[in-house]
Image (cartoon, rainbow, N blue to C red):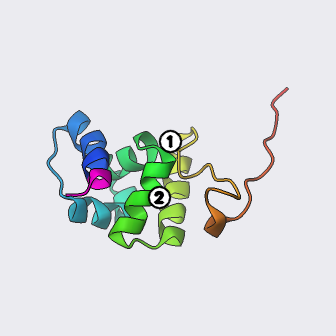
Amino acid sequence: MSSVAFKVLSTVNAPYGTDLSAAQLASKISDFASVENVDASAFSFYSEVKADLQQQFLDEMGIDKEVAFEIAQTFLQLAGYPLALEHRTENRFPLFGPMPKPTLIP
């Protein structure tokens, strides 16, 4: 197991007492059914794993970044607070484009 997978799985598995493999987690985080089922492991990946580590895991597992971003956006709507992959910048996530300007709440 790579160090990336180890770090991701440690973050995702520990709080929920699960024992997912990297392949099992990859399947969950790239499947819209995980959002429909409110899968805790997939949500944990998008909400608790740091963005750079998410990117490395997506690359390592060969997950389509557009799909991952769409799933993160859908989880964001359910969560109601920012998720790591949802925040993107031009340099760190060139595939997703520039980050929109923040809106200040008065």
Residue 55's disc is 2
Disc 1, SS: helix
Residue at 50% of width from left, 42% of height from top? 79
Please name the residue shown 35% across and 59% down the image: 34
Expressed as whole percent of the image width and height from the top left, the position of residue 35 reads: 40, 57
Can you give x and y, in whole percent of width and height, for residue 1 in the image?
19, 58
Identify the image quadrant of residue 91: bottom right
Instruction: Please state if 10 lies on the left or on the right of 32 as rendered.
Output: left
- Does any portion of residue 39 appear in the rendered image? no
The residue segment tinted magenta is 1-5
Q: Main secondary structure of the magenta part?
A: helix
Residue 64 spot, x, y in % from top left: 46, 73
Precedes in sequence: disc 2 or disc 1: 2
**Residue where numbered disc 1 is placed:** 79
Numbered disc total: 2
Report helix, strand or loop for mark 2. Answer: helix
Image quadrant containing the C terminus: top right
